Amino acid sequence: MSGPARAPSGEETIPFTFDGTTYHARPGDTLAAALLANGVGLVARSFKYHRPRGIMSAGIEEPNALVTVGKGGRTEPNTRATDVFVYPGMVAMSQNRWPSLSFDIASIFGLAAPALGAGFYYKTFFGPAKHWMLYEGFIRRAAGLGNAPTEPDPDNFSQRAGFCDVLVVGSGPAGLKAALEAAEAGKRVMLVEQDAVPGGSLLRDPDPAIDPAAMVERIKALGGEVLLRTTASGYWDHNFLTLTQRLVEPGAVPPHGFAQRLWHVRAGRVVLATGLIERPVPFANNDHPGVMLSQAVRSYVRRWGVLPGKRVVVATNNDDAYLTAQALVEAGAEVVALLDARASGPAAPAGVSVHYDARPSSVTGRKHALRNVTAVIGGSEQSFEADLIAVSGGFVPVSHLHMQAGGKLVWNEEAQAFIPGETPQMCETIGSALSPPPAPAVAPAGKAKKSFVDFQNDVSLADIDLAWQEGYRSVEHLKRYTTLGMATDQGKTSNMVALSRLAEKQGVTVPQAGLTTFRPPFTPVTMGLLAGAGARNAGAHVRRIPLHVLHKAHDPIWQPLGYWFRPRAYPVDGESLAQAALREARTVRTVAGLSDVSTLGKFEVSGPDAAALLELVCATTVGKLAVGRGRYTFMLREDGFVSDDGTVWRLAENRYLLTSSTGGADRMAHHISYVRNSLRPDLKCSVVNVQEHYAGIALAGPRARSILSALIGAEPPRHMGYVPGVLAGVPVHVLAASYSGERAFEIHVEASHAAAVWKAIEAATRAEGGAPYGLEAMELLRIEKGHVVVGGEVDGRSTPQDLGLGGMLNKAGGFIGAAGLTRPALALPDRNNLVGLVSLDGPIPEGGMLIQRAGQSPQGHVTAAARRILEGGAIALALLEGGHKRHGEEMIVSSPTRGEKARVRVTSPHFYDPAGERYRD
Amino acid sequence: MYQITCPHCGPRAQTEFTYERTTDSVVDPAADAHTAMQALYTRANPMGLDEEIWRHTYGCRAWMVLTRHRVTHVIEAVKAIGPEALA
C-alpha cells in the first residue's frame, strides 16, 4: 500500500504510535482501520517463516495482524489489531521481527521453508539428541509471538454473577430482534456484543429499516442489560456461560482501576446469533499484505471510510462478494476484475468485468505491497495489476458456543459448511449462522507450498499434503502433526479449508473426514481475569483465631496452619526462631507454658446413640468411657489407613466432645456428616461442629497443675479426665491431655470470652517463670515424645499398626476401616513402621532417605527432625521398612537435595519419658 | 457448572455443593473386606444415568442423592437423605 487510504476529514483527533511512529485515528477506529487509513499495510511477521503479513479481516478471527499493545505491566501481547479500538496515546508494536518489521533477518526462514515443514519438530526430536541441543536455542528465539510482560499487571479484574431469562449472544439483526422481542415479552434479557457498537453485519451492510442504537435503547428501557466489548467466551453445563467484558481497551489505564470483568451468567435460555466468518481462498502467496477477506474490505469501506486498495481484484465462489465489488465501486476504487469460480453469478456492478470459472493462482508484490494477481480463467492464465485482492471462499457459521453446549453440527453441502443442529441445552442458534450463502467447493489453483491455510501457524496446503503422505489420516492427528488450528485464533479461518483438503485427499465428503472439537475460550482470555481478586493474594479467606490480637501484641513469628495463622514462636531480645523455640520448649519442660490450640477440629456429639456413632467413626473404643473421662483416638479411611487423630471426651451421659487435627478438620466434618446422614440416618444423635465456637488454650509443664488449681479454685482433673469449671469468671471445659509429654491441660472456652481466660492464664504462668509457646516449640516437644502428626507420620499410607497404635484398636471391630484393615497386604512385615532415630554425629536432615550404605535404594524416610530439648543431640521420627523389629540398627540418613548426611541408630520413637510418668496419676 | 436443585434451598450453583460418591460405592460398615473393596474400587461407571450422593456443604449442609446423566449432565431427580428424610 502506498499513501494514506482515507482522505483526512479533520476527525483524525486520536494520536497513537505504531512501532514508534505517531499516527492519528478517528473515533471508532480499530487499530487495523487506523493503520490502513494511514497507509500502513505491513503490520506483522509470521510465526515460523517470518513472512510479511498485513491485515486480513475486520474482526476477532484475524490470524495475521497480531500486535503488542500497552506499556509496562499493562502490556498485552498477541492482540488482534482488528479487535482493539484506538485510544489517545495508545502504544502498539509489531512482533516477532528483528531488527525491524520491514527488514527482518529471520525472514530467511522463508527460504528454508521446505526444511521447516509439517512435523519438523517431531522429526528433530526423533533425531539424535545432539541435533536438538544444536537447534533448540535458535528455534526458541526465532519462533513465537509477542513477549509477555515481566512486570506485574497494575490493574484489577472484577468478577460478577449474572442471571437472566434470555441471554442473546451477538447484536446483529437477528440478535437485536430476538433480544427486543424477549424484553418486550417481559423477560430479563442480557445482550452481549464483542464489538464496541451494536449492529454486527449491519455495520457493514446497513439496513435503513433497522436502527441498532434505537433498538438497544429500547431493550435497556425495558430493563435489559446490554454489554458491549463483551465476549461470551465459554458455554458450560446447565446454561452457565462465562462472559469476558473489556472495561477499557488493552493497555489503557482504567479510570476505576478495573480493566476487565468476568461474568458468571446462568441463563434460562440462550440465543446464539453469532453469524458467520468468511473463508479465505488458498493460492500462492495468499498471506501477502493486500490479500483481504471480501467482507472485511466492505467493512473498511463502509464502516470506517477506508479504502484498502485503489485497484482491486475480487475473487469469490459466492454472491456475497458482488456486494463488496459494489461497495468498492461506490467508494471510487477500480475493480479491475471479478473472478467468480462458478459458471455464472448475479449481476455485477456497472463497469466491472466478471470472469467465470476463474480462480486466483498467485499474487506477487514488492516492498510488502501487492502488485499483481494471476488467475486461472477457464484453463488459461491471466494477470491483473492490482494493489488489493478481496477474497471469499464461502462462510463458516460461528458454532463454537453451540458445540461447547454439547450441540451437534449438520453438514450443508450447498454452502460447504457445518450448521448448528440439535443441542442438549436450552439454547438455539438463529440468524445467518443457520443459512450461510451457497458457496460450492472449489479446487485451489495455485502451488500448494505457498498456499497458506493456517496463517498464524504458517501451515500451507503442502503441509497438509505432507502429513497425509506420511500417514496422518485422522483430522485429530493432522491437527497435532501440522499444528493446524492450534494458534491463538484456534483455526477460525483455517479449519474448514484444511478439512476440505483432507477430505479431498481421502476421497470422502467433508463430514466423513470429521471435525475437531471447539473448546472454550472463544477468543483469548487474560489470565488475571480468571484469577480476579485472587491475583492480589486473596485467593482464600484469612481466618483469624479468637486470640489473634493478643498474640499480635507479642509480635510473634506467624505460621499458616490450615486456614489460619498461628504463632510459630514468640522471640524476645532478638532471638532467632530456633533460639526462641528451644527456650519455649525448655520452659514447658521445666516450668510451664501456654499455647493457643483454638484451631483444633472440635465436634459435639449428643444423644442416646452418640457413642454408637463415635464407635463407627473412631477406631478405638468410646462407649466404655466413664462420664468425665477421655482418651486418645484415631479415625480410619474405609481402606484401613489412618486419616486423622484426636481425643474423645464423655462430657455427660449422652454428650461427647471429639477433637481432631487442624488441617483435617474440614475433611473430618464432612466425613462425620456423611457417616451420620448417609450411612446411619437411623441413629438418635446430633453432631455439631464447634471448631470455631470454642477457643482452646493448652497449659503444659510441671507447674501446670498448681497454676490451674489456683485459677479455677478447684482440683484440676487427673490425666485424661474432664471437669467443667469457671476461670476468670468464664465457664470453661478443662481437659487433662498431654501432647507435650508434660502434665498438661486443654482449656476450652467460648471464643468471645477467650481473651480474659488467656490473660489470666498467661499472668499466672509468667508469675511462675513460664511463658507462651508457639508451634515450633510444640513440634520439638511432640517429636521428643514420639507423638504422630497428621500430614507427617500420618501420611495416608500408614495403618494403626505401622504407627504403633495397633494395640488401641477396638477389638470388637465395627468401625469404619475395620474391614479394609484385614487385607493381607496391610499385615506384611516389611511395611514402613514408625521408628525413632538418634544421631551418632550431626543434625539429621529432614526429609532424608534411610539407607544402610551409599548407593542403596532407600528403605525409609525421615518425617520430622529435631534436637533434644534439655540435653544435647539430634533426634528424628522416621518411617522405615520393617522398622518395629530394627531397633538398635545403625543406618545413614542421606539427603542428596540438601547435600547432608548423618549416621543414626534406629530406636523406639519415644525418646522422652516413655512410661508417661510425668503426667500419669 | 451444574445447577443443582437442593430439596431444601432450591436451585443453586454447583460451587455450593460437595460431591461424595455414587450410591453403588457406599461401603456398608458391616461388610467383609472383599465386599468393601469391591464397592470402593470397582464402580459401575455407566454411560447414562447414575445415582450420586452430594452435600450442600456451603448452603444448608443437607445430603441428597442426584440422579444424573453422565453424558448430558442432565439431573433428572434430587432426593433428600438423612435423618429428616426418614420420616
Image: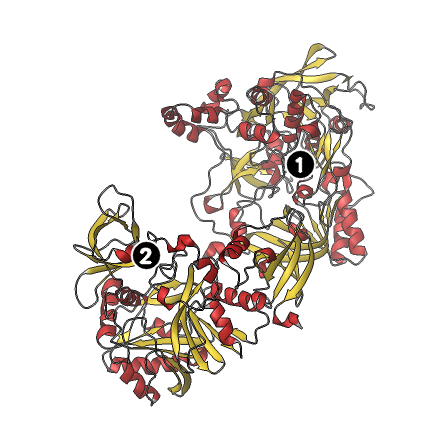
Report which residue position mark 2 lands on.
A833
- Residue B85's image quarter? bottom right
User: Horizontally, is B37 left or right of A760 in the view?
Assistant: right
- Give the residue at x 59% y 70%: A681
* Image quadrant occupied by the C terminus of chain A: bottom left
Tell me which amino acid carries mark 2: Asn
User: Horizontally, is A561 left or right of A840 in the view?
Assistant: right
Q: Is residue A536 visible?
A: yes
Numbered disc 1: secondary structure: loop
**Rendered location of residue A72, percent (x, y):** 45, 45
In the rendered view, tell whether residue A230 sits above or below residue A357.
below
- Residue A472's image quarter? top right
Tell me which numbered mark, 1 or 2, is placed earlier along the sequence: 1
Tell me which amino acid carries mark 1: Ser
**Rendered location of residue A789, percent (x, y):** 35, 63
Image mark 2: chain: A
Please tell me which residue lies in front, A439 or A43: A439
Most extreme residue toward the top, as rendered? A380
Neighbourhood count class around disc 2 (C-alpha, 10 Å): few under 14, some 14–19, many 20 upward: many
Report which residue position mark 1 lands on.
A9
